[in-house]
Amino acid sequence: MRGLERKRSRVIPLVAVVLAAVACAACQSPPPPLVTEPAGPPPRIRITNVFVFDGRVDGLTPPHDVVLDHGRVEGIVRKGMLPAEGEIVIDGTGHVLMPGLVDVHGHTGSQSAPSWSGAGRFPDPARNLQSYLYAGVTTVFDPGDLAPDVFDRREAVARGELLGPRIFASGPIFTTPGGHPVGALHGIVPWWIRWYVQRRITREVGTPEEARAAVAGLLPTRPDFIKVAVDAVPLGAPTLGGDVLKAIVEEARAHGIRTVAHIGTVADALAAADAGVAAWMHGVYKERIPDEAIARFKAARIPYVATTFVFDGYADLVEGTRTSTALERETVPADVLASLEKVPPDALPEEFHEFMKLLAATREVRCDNVRRVSAAGVPILAGADAQLGVFPGPALHREIDALIRCGVSPVNALRAATSAAARFVTGEDEPEFGIVRAGSRADLLLVNGDPLVEPAAVHSIALVIKDGRILERHPIAGAGATATPGGS
């Protein structure tokens, strides 16, 4: 009996801590929304005298009027025509209309604020979704999140019960026992909640039989993809491969589901390609791709989701060189951004110190990898990988900048975040979003200036339109935002 009492004395305080933490989070007043949408059905809208980047051709369509109705692009018509009665008219003079952005590596349930920024910060998926929309990201592929939470979130957005970008999701990450992201979870997730998170965000499989059973067990949630981790994080961690990796890919393919792979080295990338994955969900970021291996990357015909900024961002953190962007200041509390300017010495687990040093040392190597594989014709897709210091929405803009810095042309960097991204996540040659044409979804971005000539123009957002509704954007108090063009 005394032993039982001693066990209870340890359990009761733990329960009290958990309940107190949840209560503390619940008692905080929610922040004002970053975006709101008008009630009612999508109105008929005419954007006049506007240049169009349709996501397909290299240049801009000369100024036209673009008519939206019932949440779709009705047509791109000759400018100067009289508006129909009841149309909302937006003057697009001097602006460019382009597809809403697509983040091919987003995490809708992530927490980007560091643990040292203050107590009581819990993941806020609804806020993340608003942040994506504020930054003009109207579609997100979430390759790794809690299940079934992310699938419930996907359906709530699709039903219009939750305001957010369209979500494609893979759910848990398939990995070898103890493989990534298990090590990362042990480093950053408190022990008292890790047991809950780990079993929902991973599937640890050690044999082909376990792998096939785990894929089959996920099917009722209707995953859009299966995600596998073929990378050692932290350095020296075990990695998925061989017959187990092939079993996952084959079982998923048997059910019409594509598999994507988190990779880090050349060997990781080629093993994933040989297993039949549909995309590399990171570039080779740990080492230089030998010149003689570039041909193998091209021959694989697999998209390369570089996620350059996430690694550069960690390098900036450890080097103390991180600065905030305008979109971050408009969507992220100032104290959170300030906390990223100086990382406490003991903030990162010891087992990640060498990993962070590697990221700092390979900054230009991974950029050169992007340049060379892109020049060879490997398809490049834009993904930001929201996590610590990588904020949903604004981070995709950082990734577009990173791609351009690494030698991807502005038009191809924009395609990587629009039409090419949409083709990949849907598996369709003519997706209904990610492009601007008659009949496409009215998921659109109106920007101040020409992003093909001045890439920074894509960050200067005048309007975000989701499903034919003009969203009202509310920057954090004091941050300011670009003025909306006049309408009537």
Image (tube, rainbow, N blue to C red):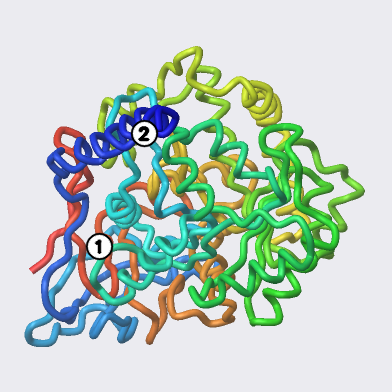
Amino acid type shown at disc 2: Arg
Question: Left or right: 120 with respect to 155?
Answer: left
> Do the CB atoms of the residues marked 2 and 1 lie less than 8 Å apart?
no
Q: Nearer the viewer, residue 240 or 37?
A: 240
Circle 1 residue: 93
Question: Is residue 92 shown above or below 390?
Answer: below
Amino acid type shown at disc 1: Thr
What residue appears at the point 59 percent right and 72 percent down from the top-left corner? Answer: 217
Which badge, 2 or 1, is on the more N-terminal residue? Answer: 2
Q: Position of residue 377 (x, y in %)?
A: 74, 61
Question: Left or right: 377 with respect to 274?
Answer: left
Q: Position of residue 55 (x, y in %)?
A: 49, 69
Question: In the rendered image, is residue 455 in sight?
Answer: no
Q: Quadrant of residue 227?
A: bottom right
What residue appears at the point 44 percent right and 61 percent down from the top-left corner? Answer: 140
Q: Quadrant of residue 58?
A: bottom right
Q: Quadrant of residue 192?
A: top left
Circle 2 residue: 8
Q: Position of residue 259 (x, y in %)?
A: 66, 67
User: At numbered mark 2, what does the secondary structure look like: helix, strand or loop?
Assistant: helix
Question: Is residue 329 shown above or below 338?
Answer: below
Question: In the rendered image, is residue 317 in sight?
Answer: yes
Question: Left or right: 208 with respect to 113?
Answer: right
Find the distance from the CA under tag 2 to the CA under tag 1.
Answer: 69 Å
Task: Using a 10 Å C-alpha cutoff, classify the residue at mark 2 as few (fewer than 14 neighbours), some (14 to 19) or many (20 or more).
Answer: few
Task: Using a 10 Å C-alpha cutoff, classify the residue at mark 1 as few (fewer than 14 neighbours), some (14 to 19) or many (20 or more).
Answer: some
Q: Nearer the viewer, residue 397 or 103?
A: 103
Q: Position of residue 154 (x, y in %)?
A: 38, 68
